[in-house]
Structure formats: C-alpha cells, structure tokens
Amino acid sequence: MTSSRTSRPTARWVVFATDRGNQGYGYAIYRLSLDGGRSERVSDPPSGDDRQPVCSPDGKWIAFRSTRGGTSDLYVRPFEPSREVRRVTRMAGPVYDPDWLATGKGLVYTGQERVEFQSVRHELRSRHAGSRNRR
C-alpha cells in the first residue's frame, strides 16, 4: 500500500490518498476515524488518481488534485461520502499542493500555465457563479 500526504484532521477524521484496494494502481481518497481507526473510501475516480486531499477549515469540503480529467487539476467534493465532485481548475500543466484559504472560500496551489509554474490564489464562489484566479 502506498499513501500520499495526510491532511490536517477535522475533529473526528483524517483524510489521505492511497492505492489500497486497487491492486497498487489508482489512488483514491479515504478518511480515517480518530475514534476507533475505521477507514472509509470517499472518492472513486473513474480513471486516473485522486491525491493530496486537504480539508476545508470548516470540515465540510475536501480539495484534492486529480488526473480523472486527463491532466492534473484541482477538484472539490463534500467531506461526507458522495458522488458530487466539482473541477475548479483547467491548467495547461499539472497542479500541485492545494491548501485552503483561512476563510475556506478559496484555494492556493502551484500550477503550470504555459511553460512556467505559478503560485495561484483561487477564490471559490457559489456553485453556479464560477470562480476566478489571482496570480
């Protein structure tokens, strides 16, 4: 079993990415209960990997990078197991190391646009209003 970094815990859970249960191929996001050690799978990418999960400050959302769309972009999903997933970036190159703004209303990450890597602050708006980047 291989795991990627573990995010900061919520009050009762820690989220992490691993290839467990996938015969060593394809990473998914799991959450581990701090009350008893039970783990639950919370993502099921149809293809590619889900990695680098990080919980929102209020514990309601998980941001993560995934190759489910072909390239490495950022996605957001509810903390509770659900099929709801929203892609929040469409960069030309890979995106790495997401983290939440302290307000929980946006993300910071490193991403490749054209031939250079940039640090980006990405504000999240309501589901229907879209989002915007600041570099």
Image: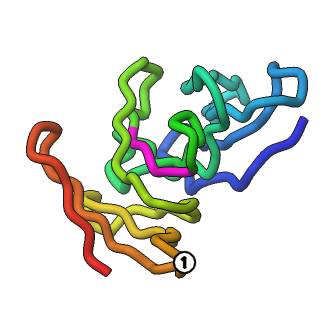
Establish if 97 lies above or below 22. below
Per the rendered image, the range of residues in magenta is: 72-76
Q: How is the image coloured?
A: rainbow
- Give the residue displayed 81% in from the left and 21% down from the top: 22
* 21 relative to 62 in the view: left or right: right
Establish if 96 lies above or below 68. below
Which quadrant does the C terminus fall into?
bottom left
* 12 relative to 86 in the view: left or right: right
Place of residue 82 in the rendered image (x, y in percent of width and height, measured from the top left): 42, 19
- Give the residue displayed 57% in from the left and 50% down from the top: 72
* 48 relative to 62 in the view: left or right: right
Place of residue 46 in the rendered image (x, y in percent of width and height, measured from the top left): 59, 20
Front residue of 47/7: it is 47
Residue lying farthest to the left in this orientation: 129
Residue 42 colored in magenta in the image: no
Q: 10 Å neighbourhood of mark 1: few (<14), some, or many (≥20)?
A: few
Place of residue 40 in the rendered image (x, y in percent of width and height, measured from the top left): 63, 22
Would you identify the image quadrant in which residue 128 lies?
Answer: top left
Instruction: Residue type at mark 1: give it.
Output: Val
- Give the residue displayed 89% in from the left and 30% down from the top: 24
Which residue has dot 1 on it?
115
Front residue of 131/108: it is 131
